[in-house]
Image (cartoon, rainbow, N blue to C red):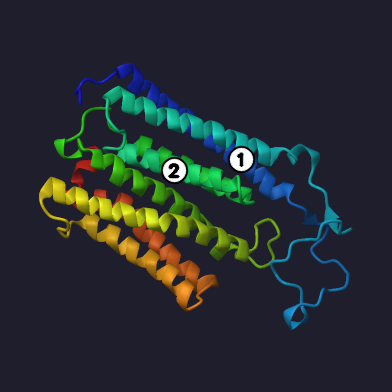
């Protein structure tokens, strides 16, 4: 690959990242208005009406107000379109994020995830992509405020602390395995971020909240994301071992990155196994998947920052 850099495209890529952050921030604000005012809310904290008999003779804590209930207020007219505006701004941010990745790659004539900055940018893109495409099929627009703010913070961190000038990569990365291995890791990471956001909301949600979806819905979305992401992460780990054999002559070398990628795989496997065989659900299962999510974040960012190894070519700029 050519070592020459198209400075114009590289500068355009940096500018598109800033535009992406703005789109995600404005989308987060729109989602927040939709979440705060767009969902039907009770006219008062307590309403004197018959309680529906359920298990134990009480109304479920997570029950939302019924449609047509006289105790339900219609959302204000000025927030009726807030959720749709948030989705539209998210797609604009997604497009700007994609354009920034493409222009970065064209500027250096290589696949644009050869260092920490490029990887984090791609991971934020994958997280928003996972949310946007999942919300086309499932009613998960409520996650928009949290996914977009996570993406905006991730991109801000990348620009502030990880940014390096566009340029060639070390010879070990000039391989088609970069596309196979890293692409799979990025896609899986995006899905795991969506699941992690759901898990955090599950733990912080109060029983009296009517603005957030039920814990059952949060857990269901997290499980679906992990079920899709886990085999992709498995493939990424296997592809990484095959690349290691080609580059360094061994499949496994106890490199910190390899160890933490495998630890992450084990914890997510434990989560899926516990749900499938032992019937784990609720808080216990959520805690396990959040432990896996913490391992993922440490593997993707912490290992490169705090631990040296064969993958230190992607370390933070000095």
Which circle's residue, 2 or 1, is located before the other in the chain? 1
Which residue is more in the foreground, 226 or 9?
226
- Classify mark 2: helix, strand or loop: helix
x then y, percent, for residue 216: 61, 66
Give the side of residue 1 with respect to residue 212, left or right: left
The residue that appears at 25% across and 21% down in the rendered structure is 5
The residue that appears at 27% across and 25% down in the rendered structure is 109
**Mark 2 closeness class: few <14, some 14–19, many ≥20 residues within 10 Å:** many
The label shown at residue 127 is none
x then y, percent, for residue 226: 46, 59
x then y, percent, for residue 104: 34, 27
x then y, percent, for residue 137: 61, 48
Which residue of the protein is positioned furthest toward the bottom in this rendering? 56
Residue topped by disc 2: 126
What's the CA distance linking mark 2 and mark 1?
A: 21 Å
- Image depth: mark 2 or mark 1 in front: 2
The residue that appears at 44% across and 26% down in the rendered structure is 16
Q: In which quadrant is the N terminus drawn?
A: top left
Residue 102 seen in the figure: yes
- Classify mark 1: helix, strand or loop: helix
**Mark 1 closeness class: few <14, some 14–19, many ≥20 residues within 10 Å:** many
Q: Is residue 186 above or below residue 93?
A: below
Q: Is residue 117 above or below residue 16?
A: below
Residue topped by disc 1: 29
Q: Are marks 2 and 1 in contact (CB under 8 Å)?
A: no
Count the marks: how many? 2
């Amino acid at each position: 690959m050519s070592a020459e850099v198209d400075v114009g495209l590289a500068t355009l890529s940096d500018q598109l990242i800033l535009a992406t952050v703005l789109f995600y921030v404005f989308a987060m604000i729109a989602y927040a208005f939709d979440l705060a005012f767009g969902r039907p809310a009770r006219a008062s904290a307590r309403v004197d009406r018959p309680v529906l008999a359920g298990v134990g003779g009480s109304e479920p804590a997570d029950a939302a107000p019924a449609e047509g209930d006289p105790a339900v207020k219609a959302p204000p007219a000025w927030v009726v379109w807030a959720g749709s505006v948030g989705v539209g701004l998210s797609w604009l941010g997604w497009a700007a994020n994609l354009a920034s990745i493409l222009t970065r790659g064209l500027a250096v004539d290589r696949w644009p995830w050869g260092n920490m900055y490029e990887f984090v940018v791609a991971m934020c893109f994958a997280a928003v992509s996972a949310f946007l495409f999942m919300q086309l099929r499932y009613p998960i627009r409520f996650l928009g405020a949290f996914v977009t703010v996570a993406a905006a913070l991730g991109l801000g961190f990348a620009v502030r602390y990880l940014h390096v000038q566009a340029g060639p990569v070390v010879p070990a990365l000039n391989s088609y395995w970069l596309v196979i291995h890293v692409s799979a890791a990025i896609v899986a990471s995006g899905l795991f971020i969506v699941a992690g956001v759901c898990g955090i909301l599950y733990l912080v949600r109060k029983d009296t909240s009517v603005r957030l979806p039920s814990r059952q819905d949060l857990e269901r979305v997290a499980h679906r994301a992990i079920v899709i992401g886990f085999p992709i992460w498995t493939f990424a780990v296997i592809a990484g071992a095959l690349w290691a054999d080609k580059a360094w002559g061994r499949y496994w070398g106890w490199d910190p990155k390899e160890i933490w990628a495998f630890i992450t795989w084990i914890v997510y496997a434990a989560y899926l196994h516990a749900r499938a065989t032992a019937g784990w659900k609720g808080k216990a299962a959520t805690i396990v998947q959040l432990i896996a999510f913490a391992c993922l974040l440490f593997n993707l960012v912490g290992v490169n920052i705090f631990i040296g190894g064969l993958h230190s070519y992607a370390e933070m700029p000095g």
